[in-house]
Image (spheres, rainbow, N blue to C red):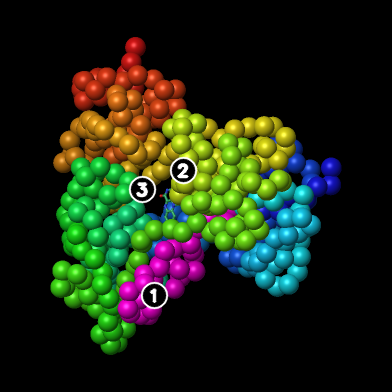
């Protein structure tokens, strides 16, 4: 077989597709084209240890260069794909070169949503998606710096946590009544708000950023709808992700909040697949379509794409999971809580160790496990296997977490 598989995007999904193609026995040519100049790397440490200089750069890389050589995979780094001719099965790159393919994989991820208010281009304003983003802000990331975080989602809160730990003076602006409103119940949001407040972070909820003014000497003044004027040498914005779909859409591939794929990660155009943050995919466990932003999803879809390119006819059927590290707290979320009509809390939030079970008509949809790895594991099993649960047992701390599955 002398087929060529080309992967666009060198993130977690792209790197996994390369590795899994060889593991599945693909003997053809593999070319990965990525616009970032670095080898594929992990993003989670960017808002955690790496941001604070606690982690060496080498440890970010998913695999060293020699690994890809050994797999006989060609990496074209620092160059974007600009257009695709799906009839000719050919790509055109930004440097003018072309690349033919037999199978094409979109692993194009997403890019940060940007502020649009006046003053959004102030030099103190930074975003957090790439290694380059971190390097651009690291010089300002030091004890005593006033940091304003815009957005109380996971990336904003993780940034606040690592900054507070390193002595920055942190203020978080959140538009909703509690942080994490989009993804968690109010109790979980309030818990994270309280641990940040205990660490000296000032969290302003129900607060909208209206504009940014220049205070001089590199300082930005954030003007809010509540009439506040917050001064900061560093502003980190975490207000969401936009999936990179434009290249696919311009090639005539169906997109709708992501590149639309079927259960085999196939797009609407023959021989073209997609994996990771850029996909809008069906999930058979929840019987609905979703777009996820998680390492687990990127890895598993990369594996699914590789298996299907190798003719295995493998459907993607995973229970989503995600983690976040803030201070001494490890949050592990399994499942998707959308549509829940009941929450059950096991344990006490004040103890910094508890789990919130999200149910819909008595069926377990998702769990936020806070310093509760056993509950995370058992919930994953319950959701994956569609097992029954009893609310009384979930609440009863005398029952070991491992025994929560109904007999
Ligand atoms: C700061 C931060 C912290 C995170 N923490 C966690 C965490 O704790 N747990 C968790 O599960 N997830 C976390 N995530 C999310 C996780 O990192 C992502 O879900 C994952 O990296 C997605 O991988 P991907 O390969 O789909 O996309 P990406 O990592 O976005 O990679 C896509 C790549 O494709 C490139 N590309 C796009 N278009 C083109 C083109 N036309 N030509 C060439 N290249 C192109 C992009 O520039 C990018 O480099 C975090 C993300 C960030 C940013």
At x 76%, y 55%, the residue is 87
Residue 364 left/right relative to 285: left
In this view, the mark in front (3 or 2): 2
Q: Tell whether 72 sits left or right of 213.
A: right
Asked if residue 126 shows in the view, the reply is yes
Q: Distance between the residues labelled 3 and 2?
A: 20 Å
> Which quadrant of the rendered structure holds the C terminus?
top left
Q: In this view, does 337 lie to the left or right of 93?
A: left
Q: Give the label, 1 or 2, closer to the camera.
A: 2
Give the residue number, with chain letter if any, for mark 1: 139
The reply, left or right, for residue 53 in relation to residue 245 is left
Q: How crowded is mark 3: few (under 14 residues within 10 Å), some or many (20 or more)?
A: some
In the picture shown, does residue 21 fall above or below 389?
below
| Residue at the disc numbered 3 | 324
SS under mark 3:
strand
Q: Residue at x 59, y 33 (%)?
A: 315
Mark toward the start of the polypeptide (1 vs 2): 1
Image: magenta residue range: 107-136
Q: Was residue 387 drawn as part of the magenta stretch in this picture?
A: no
Instruction: Please report the residue visible at 58 percent of the width from the left and 65 percent of the height from the top.
Output: 36
| Residue found at the far right of this picture | 1
Location of residue 225 (image quadrant): bottom left
Q: 10 Å neighbourhood of mark 2: few (<14), some, or many (≥20)?
A: some
Q: How crowded is mark 1: few (under 14 residues within 10 Å), some or many (20 or more)?
A: few
Q: Earlier in the sequence, mark 3 or mark 2?
A: 2
Measuring from the top left, give residue 135's x and y in whole percent.
Answer: 46, 70
The answer to whether mark 3 is within 8 Å of ligand 1 is yes
User: Is residue 23 visible in the rendered structure shown here?
Assistant: no
Query: Label 2 belongs to which residue?
Result: 290
């Amino acid at each position: 077989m002398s087929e060529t598989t080309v992967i666009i995007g060198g993130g977690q999904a792209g790197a996994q597709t390369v590795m899994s193609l060889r593991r599945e026995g693909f003997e053809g040519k593999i070319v990965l084209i990525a616009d970032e100049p670095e080898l594929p790397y992990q993003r989670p440490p960017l808002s955690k240890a790496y941001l604070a200089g606690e982690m060496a750069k080498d440890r970010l890389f998913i695999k060293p260069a020699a690994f890809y050589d050994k797999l006989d995979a060609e990496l074209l780094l620092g160059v974007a794909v600009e257009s695709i001719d799906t009839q000719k099965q050919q790509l055109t790159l930004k440097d003018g070169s072309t690349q033919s393919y037999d199978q094409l994989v979109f692993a194009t991820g997403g890019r940060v949503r940007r502020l649009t208010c006046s003053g959004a281009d102030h030099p103190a304003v930074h975003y957090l998606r790439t290694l380059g983003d971190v390097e651009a802000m690291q010089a300002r990331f030091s004890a005593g710096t006033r940091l304003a975080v815009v957005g109380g989602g996971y990336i904003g809160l993780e940034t606040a946590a690592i900054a507070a730990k390193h002595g920055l003076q942190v203020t978080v602006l959140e538009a909703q009544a509690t942080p994490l409103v989009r993804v968690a119940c109010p109790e979980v949001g309030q818990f994270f708000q309280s641990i940040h407040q205990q660490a000296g972070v000032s969290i302003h909820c129900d607060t909208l950023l209206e504009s940014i003014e220049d205070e001089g000497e590199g300082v930005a003044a954030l003007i809010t709808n509540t009439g506040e004027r917050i001064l900061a040498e560093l502003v980190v914005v975490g207000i969401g992700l936009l999936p990179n779909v434009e290249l696919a859409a311009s090639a005539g591939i169906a997109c709708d909040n992501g590149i639309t794929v079927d259960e085999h990660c196939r797009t609407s155009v023959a021989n073209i697949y997609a994996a990771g943050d850029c996909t809008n995919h069906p999930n058979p466990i929840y019987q609905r379509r979703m777009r996820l932003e998680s390492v687990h999803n990127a890895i598993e879809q990369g594996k699914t794409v590789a298996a299907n390119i190798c003719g295995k006819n493998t459907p993607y059927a995973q229970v989503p999971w995600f983690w976040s590290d803030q201070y001494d707290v490890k949050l592990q979320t399994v499942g998707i809580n959308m549509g829940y009509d009941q929450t059950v809390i096991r344990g006490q939030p004040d103890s910094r160790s508890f789990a919130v079970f999200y149910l819909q008509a008595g069926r377990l949809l998702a769990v936020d496990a806070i310093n509760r790895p056993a509950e995370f594991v058992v919930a994953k099993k319950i959701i994956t296997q569609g097992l029954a649960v009893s609310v009384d047992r979930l609440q009863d701390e005398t029952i070991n977490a491992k025994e929560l599955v109904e007999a």
